[in-house]
Amino acid sequence: MRRFSRPPRKASNSSKKKKKVGLPPGTLIYTGDKVKEKTKIKVTDYTVDHFNFQEFKDIEIDLTKIEKPLIRWVDIYGLTQVKVIEEVGHQFRLHPLVLEDILSPNQRPKLEDYESYIFVVLKKLSWNQEEDEFEYEQISLILGENYVISFQERDTNLFNPIYERIQVPKGRVRLMGADYLFYVLIDIIIDNYFIVLEKVGEDIENIEDILIKNPVPETLQLIYRLKRSSIELRKSIWPIREVINRLQREQSKLIREELQIYLRDIYDHIFRISDLLENYRDIIFGMLDMYLSSVSNKMNDIMKVLTIISTIFIPLSFLAGFYGMNFLNMPELAQPYSYPILICIMGLIAFIMIYFFKKKRWL
C-alpha cells in the first residue's frame, strides 16, 4: 500500500527560518531543503529557424542581451547558491521580494504582475517510488517580453519533454512567443497532478476492498494518512484556480489575445482536478464512516454470539444449580437414572433453544 504523507522537513530548515525572523523584507536566505545539488543554469535561445542551448554553473554571460526575434528560456536548477539567484535578479531587475519568494519554497501558489514581467509561484507534485509517497516542490516562473525564467529546487526532468519540443524545427513552441512557452511550462506542471491523483484513486480502491472484506486497525491508519494527504493536496491545488483565472482576466501586454484559449484550457484542467480531489475527499470521509460501521457491526456480531451462548446456558445453569443443592432427603437420590435423565432434559432444552434462535434468524 502506498503511503501519502508529506516528507518531514529537516531541522536545518527550521533554523534557517528562525534566522530570517526580524530581518528586513527582501533579505535573501534559502529556507528550503538542504540538498547537495549545485546550481545549474540552462539557457535556451530559439526562433522559428534557430536553436541554441548552453549550460552554466555560474553567471558567465549577460542573460538580458536578447536580440529580437530570439526567445530565451533561462532554466535554473538548485537554489542553494544565493549569490547566483541574486545575480539573475540583478540582471533582469527583479524585485527583492520576488527573489525572497523564490528562495522560500513554502509559498502559496500566487501571481504577481510587475508590468514589465509576471511572477507566478506553483507547486509541482510528483511520486517518489523509493519512499512510496508523493513530494512537493515549488516552481517559480517569470514571464518577460521575450524571455521566461524558471526556478526549481532540484533537477527532476519535469521539463525534458519541453526541451524536446523546442528542438523540433518549426514546431508550435518555436512559432509562438515567450507567453506560449510560459503557458507550456504551467500546463506540464498541472498535467502532472493527474498522475498523482490517479495513484490516490488506486489507494482508495485498495482500501475500499479491505473495508469490504476484513477491516483491521491498520486500515484506519491508512485512511487517516489519505485524509491528511488530501488536505495537503487541496492546499497546493486549490489556489492555482485563482492564479489561472487572474491570468485570463488581467490585461497584460505580455500575454497576447490568442493565448487566452490555451489559458482557458488550463483552467478547465485545474477545474477538473479540483472536482476530482473533492470527490476523493468525500470518498475518504465516507471510508472513515464505513470503517467505523464495519467495526461496530463486527462487535455486534460478537456480542450476539455471546448473548446467545449465555441465554442457552441460563436454564441449564438453573437446573444444574437446583439439583446440586445438598438436601439429605432428595427423592432423586433413590433413582439411579435421575441424573442421566436430567442431562438429557438439559440437552433437549439447549436443542430447542438453538432451533428457536435459528427459526428467528438470530443465528
Image (tube, helix red, strand yellow):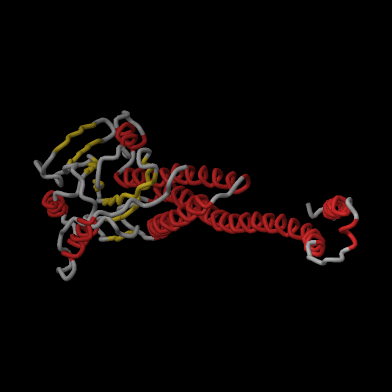
Total marks drawn? 0
Nearer to us in this view, 164 or 202: 202
Q: Residue furthest bottom?
A: 22
Q: Residue at 25% of width from left, 43% of height from top?
A: 154
Residue 336: image location, x then y, percent = 88, 51
* On screen, residue 174 above or below 293: above
Q: Say whether residue 315 is left or right of residue 47.
A: right
Q: Nearer the viewer, residue 294 or 183?
A: 294
Q: From where the camera sits, is residue 331 visible?
A: yes
Q: Tell whether 41 sits left or right of 331.
A: left
Instruction: Give x and y (percent) for residue 354.
Output: 82, 52
Above or below, 181 relative to 352:
above
* In the displayed structure image, the side of residue 232 where residue 32 appears, left or right: left
Q: Quadrant of residue 17?
A: bottom left
How far across and down, in percent of the image, does residue 320 sit?
79, 60
| Residue 244 rendering spot, x and y as whole percentages | 40, 55
> In the image shown, does 266 or 237 lie closer to the viewer?
237
In the picture as drawn, the residue positioned furthest to the left comes out as 60
Residue at 46% of width from left, 51% of height from top?
A: 270
Q: Which residue is situated farthest in the top direction here?
A: 169
Residue 244 visible (yes or no) = no
Q: Nearer the viewer, residue 348 or 131?
A: 348
